[in-house]
């Protein structure tokens, strides 16, 4: 019984790693994330690893049948956030934010069906999505 439990635990551990990919080893073609060379569809969590050994890997986002879904976060090589936004059915949707390499918010964009409908320069404009969200109604 103990041996069966031990084998089950190992299997669970291996299975949980099967859906973990590193963006450094993937490609994006026609808005789909795939493995290089064979264009195999993938599903699971996407991470980034850094050249700096002092930086831990960070989650970037998730794909389902190679389509990006949910929240995605891009990272600069120094480990600071580069962008953050949401994908719906593989398309950018809602508010996206972009930071420079020093961590300063530079741009705020509003996407609808993968197209920018509003863009703000956060250096010259006030970027406060909490104010804007009250006045934006999005229908599917």
Image: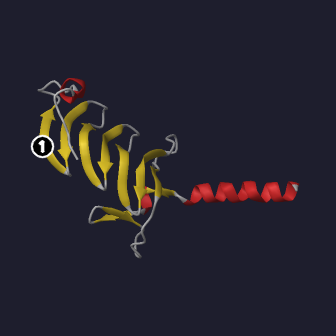
Question: How busy is the neighbourhood of tag 1: few (under 14 within 10 Å), some, or many (20 plus)?
Answer: few
User: 138 or 77, which is in the foreground?
Assistant: 138
Image location of residue 135, percent across then percent down: 16, 28
Left/right placement of residue 91 relative to residue 11 reads left
Query: Residue shown at 25%/31% (left/top)?
Result: 105
Q: Helix, strand or loop at disc 1?
A: strand
Image location of residue 44, percent across then percent down: 48, 56
User: 34 or 50, which is in the foreground?
Assistant: 34
Image location of residue 94, percent across then percent down: 24, 41
60, above or below 37, in the image? above
Image location of residue 99, percent across then percent down: 27, 36
Image quarter of the N terminus = bottom right
Coloration mode: secondary structure
Quadrant in the picture for residue 36:
bottom left
User: 45 or 131, which is in the foreground?
Assistant: 131
Left/right placement of residue 119 relative to residue 30 reads left
User: Which residue is the extreme one toward the front?
Assistant: 140
Labels in figure, total: 1
User: Which residue is the extreme one toward the right?
Assistant: 1
Q: Which residue is identified by label 1?
A: 117
Left/right placement of residue 61 relative to residue 119 reads right
Quadrant in the picture for residue 67:
bottom left
């Amino acid at each position: 019984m103990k041996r069966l439990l031990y084998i089950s635990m190992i299997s669970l551990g291996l299975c949980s790693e099967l859906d973990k990919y590193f963006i450094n080893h993937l490609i994006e073609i026609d808005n789909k994330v795939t493995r290089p060379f064979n264009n195999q569809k993938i599903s699971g969590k996407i991470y980034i690893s850094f050249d700096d050994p002092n930086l831990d890997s960070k989650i970037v986002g998730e794909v389902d049948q190679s389509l990006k879904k949910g929240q995605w976060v891009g990272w600069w090589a120094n480990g600071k956030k580069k962008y953050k936004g949401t994908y719906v059915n593989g398309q950018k949707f809602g508010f996206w934010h972009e930071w420079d390499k020093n961590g300063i918010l530079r741009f705020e964009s509003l996407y609808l069906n993968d197209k920018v409908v509003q863009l703000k320069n956060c250096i010259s404009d006030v970027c406060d999505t909490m104010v804007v969200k009250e006045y934006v109604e999005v229908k599917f």
